[in-house]
């Protein structure tokens, strides 16, 4: 058991490294917005007062805390004389709102950068990748036919004897080839053969 | 014979360990994928296998005890074996419990194993809530991007841009920081040219968003299109679709969902959110061995993740759990109920703390009024229910017809062009009408809103009589000109939405159905509500109104009619019952409106069921031919097992494997010549007495592995499935023992068993195949596909539409 343990640990850690990495990345990215401290410009009390007799409607914003968020504290200057204040304030509706500008900024910037990265990667795959791959004799062009078994068996054969096939670059390339094949299979199923998701 | 699947390696024991490490290293990359890799990649990963073919008998025993990687996994587009998965989980649990008594480490292991489920639920809730927050904020921003941009910071949408500045009462939306496109380009916002420029920019942005969405889907993750709920239903019933719940699908679905919603298309984000949450669930399952290796346990987790998905979409945790129970899941053990609720709560809480809408609400159209309603109003509510049922049946029929056309004719060859054309039509028709220009969630929110003094929208432009106002309680008033304009604009919007959604749902972008159906229902409800309100105002002396709706009282709430209409239409399309009512009442925050909602939902379900039996998701499952055995319908025909089993009367006899008299070569021939997914094992061909059942995939893996690793296995070696193999002359090659891959307890029925019982067995136990015996002898086999074809035949549908195994 103990001789197998380090090997099993290595395998399982390799298996779970990728999702753990994803999780850690997501956590780092999403935690700061959730804990962002509220700056003073992110809270407000908004009082909407409708037209009253000959006074037109008005909206009042003020930067107060939740317990002070009512008509008497926020509506300044009071447009009606003292005895009418209560009647006027009954019509007004005051709401306490808060937001986090940091969260919004971070999320929009994350989103745009992911979209940008995907677009760049797509451009790379469509334009640059075929040019790089041409002079390499060991890779086969990916067909759209049913001979996927040939490409699979070819990819399963390790690099020529003597060279270590385990360098990072080669492994990344292998993973990328596999992913491309997977996407092509999916595309065939959904778009060409209409087997799924119509 | 083609030896493609049976390559023999030149395996030398001298370099055994080094070679194995190398192969193991290469194969570890392959197993980094989310799902189990397909068949012939598994040949290398033997790191748990100690020593090569060096020691004779001891390695054979090891070989028998430890399962090979790959044995017990499934091919793509196959059904899992629920019975086997559940029994494997019970075995694992038993082993851990037994070992926990040995040492503290083992005890800790057993405790952590018990807690792993709850930890997984927590993580799923966190991730699903965060992704939903990201989707909400980005979609809100990008929707407003079509109209203008904020100069104070481009990441603010319209509402947040005007947060700080002082707006006037009448022009609440205008503030100097927010510039529409014509204001930005031309410098002013008035005039015909500015309007045309705004129109043009709106259409351009809509087209850009939708084109980007469909290109991303096509280029990176074709499985990310559509709603996702029919496929998740099928996956939860035991089907395997590799890559459907993977990392790339998750990323692409999240990104393109925002783009699709922002482009103004008539679709919603609730259905795709369920898919996103299930992807999160599937990805996080890989952190825990208990769920990674067992497909049945994984599906329990996916049920809980689906509940979390609906919970963040509607802010309704209980509704989410009930939706998962009613619509999505196939088997829902009680343990899953509590865990789903936990996951849904965590997800809702996470979303609330991200606070996407700035008012601590989870949905844009949260309803906050609690006006009473009168019993006589049930009549219009039931009318709305009938409308919902009719619209639901109409929508399902036309959408399925359109999707079938997309599947079979040339229309399906141009997905990108289709998305372009539909977006162009939607954007061009939507801009002139204010109610279609705004996003559908905002439209629903405005329709649900009860008009108070403070509302200045067109829909609330009633003729006000200020002398009689007491506080915030407004009586029923006559409609002003603004209301009449709003009415015909809403009617046009209704017609447009009814027709354009038919062509939008099912396109190759992530598309949901909940929001468009709720919009249709809300518009219809509001129209009816305003009509009833005006009727009550102008004819308050009629008998039906005089009792409860006197002049000056506030009796009719059009917002409530909109809500009831939304529930009716949603129920008519999806045929949800309990979950719909619970979601709607969690949206309103009170029990006052349960009776109208239930009345409308029940009426719409009855009317829709009278016209067509299936909801939209079941109809899509049938359209795509997924092997989904419907759990709710009764099988009421009097056929028997012998009518359905294979082989039929004129077919060649059943392909069987004998328990100890076939050679490796014979078995290989059988496996390559036939395509069955499993073979029964019998005592001998003459007696046909059943021993067990062996799966094709397990056979292939074991034989290949034996040829490579074991000494002396050649084509003429005998394969033995029993514990005690018959003695062979000493000159014959060594025996290949495959007892470990044989299932000794296959399910059998006799040939006279009624098909009702057979279908029930398949449903309740989740079988893939069932053997048929006659007088104790093996006669034939019934697979799930045969059962589905038989049901289709009995219902006069095309049995060849079942495409998958």
Image: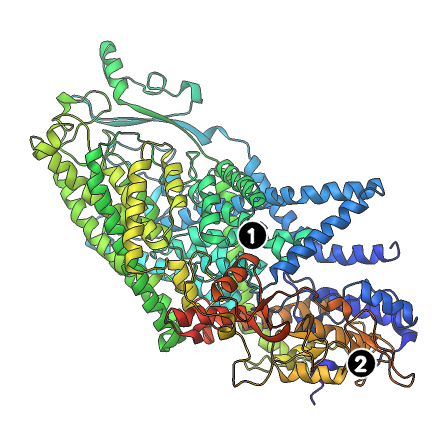
Q: Which of the labelled discs sits on residue A78, or is there none?
A: none
Residue at 71 percent across and 74 percent down: it is B699
Q: Where is residue B30 drawn, in percent x and y?
A: 69, 66
Whether residue B595 can be seen here: yes
Looking at the rendering, which quadrant does residue B446 occupy? top left
Of B192 and B596, which appears nearest the observer? B596
Residue identified by numbered label 1: B302
Q: Residue furthest bottom?
A: B1
Q: Where is residue B368 drawn, in percent x and y?
A: 34, 32
Q: Residue B398 vs residue A9: left or right?
A: left
Q: Residue furthest top?
A: A83
Residue at 61 percent across and 59 percent down: it is B82
Residue identified by numbered label 2: B718
Between the C-alphas of marks 1 and 2, the distance is 43 Å
Image vertical order of residue B622 relative to residue A9, above or below: below
Q: Residue B543 vs residue A174: left or right?
A: left
Q: Where is residue A48 drawn, in percent x and y?
A: 29, 27
Give the quadrant of the N terminus of chain B.
bottom right
Looking at the rendering, which quadrant does residue B715 occupy? bottom right
| Label 2 Cα crowd, 10 Å radius (few <14 / some 14-19 / many 20+) | many
Q: Where is residue B568 drawn, in percent x and y?
A: 30, 47
Give the quadrant of the C terminus of chain B.
bottom right
């Amino acid at each position: 058991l103990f001789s197998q343990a380090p090997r099993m640990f290595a395998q399982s850690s390799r298996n779970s490294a990728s999702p753990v990495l994803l999780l850690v990345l997501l956590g780092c990215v999403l935690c700061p917005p959730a804990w962002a401290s509220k700056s003073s410009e992110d809270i407000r009390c908004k009082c909407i007062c409708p037209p009253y007799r000959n006074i037109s409607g008005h909206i009042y914003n003020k930067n107060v805390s939740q317990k002070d968020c009512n008509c008497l504290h926020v509506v300044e200057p009071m447009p009606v004389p003292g005895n009418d204040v209560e009647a006027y304030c009954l019509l007004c509706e005051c709401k306490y709102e808060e937001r986090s500008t940091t969260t919004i900024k971070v999320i929009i910037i994350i989103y745009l950068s992911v979209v940008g990265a995907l677009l760049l990667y797509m451009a790379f795959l469509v334009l640059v990748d075929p040019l790089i791959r041409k002079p390499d004799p060991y890779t086969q062009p990916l067909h759209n036919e049913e001979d996927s078994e040939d490409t699979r068996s070819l990819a399963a054969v390790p690099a020529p004897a003597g060279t270590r096939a385990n360098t990072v670059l080669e492994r990344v390339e292998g993973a990328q080839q596999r992913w491309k094949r997977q996407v092509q299979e999916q595309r065939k199923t959904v778009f060409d053969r209409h087997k799924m998701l119509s | 014979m083609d030896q493609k699947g049976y390559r023999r390696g030149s395996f030398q024991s001298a370099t055994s360990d080094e070679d194995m490490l190398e192969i193991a290293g290469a194969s570890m990359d392959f197993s980094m994928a989310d799902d189990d890799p397909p068949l012939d990649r598994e040949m290398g990963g033997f790191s748990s296998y100690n020593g090569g073919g060096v020691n004779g008998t001891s390695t054979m025993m090891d070989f028998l005890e430890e399962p090979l990687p790959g044995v017990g996994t499934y091919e793509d587009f196959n059904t899992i074996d629920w019975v086997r998965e559940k029994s494997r989980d019970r075995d694992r649990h038993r082993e851990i419990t037994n070992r926990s008594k040995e040492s503290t480490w083992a005890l800790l292991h057993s405790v952590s194993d018990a807690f792993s489920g709850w930890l997984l639920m927590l993580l799923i809730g966190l991730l699903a809530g965060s992704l939903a927050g990201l989707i909400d904020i980005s979609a809100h921003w990008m929707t407003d991007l079509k109209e203008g941009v904020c100069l104070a910071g481009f990441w603010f949408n319209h509402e947040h841009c005007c947060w700080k500045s002082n707006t006037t009462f009448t022009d609440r939306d205008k503030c100097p920081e927010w510039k529409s496109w014509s204001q930005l380009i031309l410098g002013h916002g008035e005039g015909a040219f500015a309007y045309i420029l705004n129109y043009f920019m709106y259409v351009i942005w809509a087209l850009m968003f939708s084109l980007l969405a469909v290109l991303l889907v096509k280029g990176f993750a074709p499985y990310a299109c559509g709603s996702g709920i029919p496929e998740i239903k099928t996956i939860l019933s035991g089907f395997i679709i590799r890559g459907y719940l993977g990392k790339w699908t998750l990323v692409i679905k999240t990104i393109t969902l925002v783009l699709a919603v922002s482009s103004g298309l008539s679709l919603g984000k609730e259905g795709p959110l369920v898919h996103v949450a299930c992807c999160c669930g599937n990805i996080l399952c890989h952190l825990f061995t208990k769920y990674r290796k067992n497909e049945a346990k994984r599906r329990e987790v996916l049920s809980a993740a689906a509940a979390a998905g609906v919970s963040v979409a509607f802010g309704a945790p209980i509704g989410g759990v009930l939706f998962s129970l009613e619509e999505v899941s196939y088997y829902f053990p009680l343990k899953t109920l509590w865990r789903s609720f936990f996951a849904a709560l965590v997800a809702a809480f996470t979303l609330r703390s991200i606070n996407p809408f700035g008012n601590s609400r989870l949905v844009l159209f949260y309803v906050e009024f609690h006006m009473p309603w009168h019993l006589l109003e049930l009549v219009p509510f039931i009318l709305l229910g009938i409308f919902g049922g009719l619209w639901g049946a109409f929508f399902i029929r036309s959408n399925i017809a359109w999707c079938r056309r997309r599947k079979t004719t040339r229309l399906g060859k141009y997905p990108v062009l289709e998305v372009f054309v539909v977006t162009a039509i939607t954007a061009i028709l939507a801009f002139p009408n204010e109610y279609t220009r705004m996003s559908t969630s905002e439209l629903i929110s405005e329709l649900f809103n009860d008009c108070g003094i403070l509302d200045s929208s067109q829909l609330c432009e009633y003729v006000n009589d200020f002398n009689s106002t007491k506080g915030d309680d407004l009586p029923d008033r006559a409609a002003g000109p603004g209301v009449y304009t709003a009415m015909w604009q809403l009617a046009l919007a209704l017609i447009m939405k009814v027709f354009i959604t038919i062509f939008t749902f099912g396109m190759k972008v992530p598309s949901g159905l909940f929001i468009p159906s709720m919009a249709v229902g809300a518009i219809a409800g509001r129209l009816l509500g305003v009509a009833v309100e005006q009727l009550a105002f102008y004819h308050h002396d009629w008998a039906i109104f005089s009792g409860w709706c006197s002049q000056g009282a506030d009796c009719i709430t059009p917002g409530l009619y909109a809500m009831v209409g939304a529930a009716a239409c949603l129920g008519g399309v999806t045929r949800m019952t309990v979950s719909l009512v619970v979601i709607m009442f969690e949206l309103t925050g009170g029990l006052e409106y349960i009776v109208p909602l239930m009345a409308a939902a029940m009426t719409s379900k009855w009317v829709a069921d009278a016209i067509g039996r299936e909801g939209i998701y079941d109809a899509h499952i049938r359209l795509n031919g997924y092997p989904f055995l419907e759990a709710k319908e009764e099988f009421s025909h009097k056929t028997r097992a012998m009518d359905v089993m294979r082989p039929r009367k004129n077919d060649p006899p059943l392909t069987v494997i004998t328990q100890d008299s076939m050679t490796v070569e014979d078995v290989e021939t059988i496996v390559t010549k036939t395509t069955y997914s499993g073979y029964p094992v019998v005592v001998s061909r003459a007696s046909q007495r059943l021993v067990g059942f062996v799966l094709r995939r397990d056979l292939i893996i074991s034989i290949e592995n034996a040829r490579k690793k074991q000494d002396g296995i050649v084509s003429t070696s005998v394969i033995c499935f029993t514990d005690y193999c018959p003695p062979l002359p000493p000159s014959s090659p060594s025996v290949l023992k495959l007892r470990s891959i044989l299932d000794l307890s296959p399910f059998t029925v006799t040939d006279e068993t009624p098909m009702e019982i057979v279908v029930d067995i398949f449903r309740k136990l989740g079988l893939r195949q069932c053997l048929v015996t006659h007088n104790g002898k093996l006669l034939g086999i019934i697979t799930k596909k045969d059962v589905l074809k038989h049901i289709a035949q009995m219902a006069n549908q095309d049995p060849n539409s079942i495409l998958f195994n």
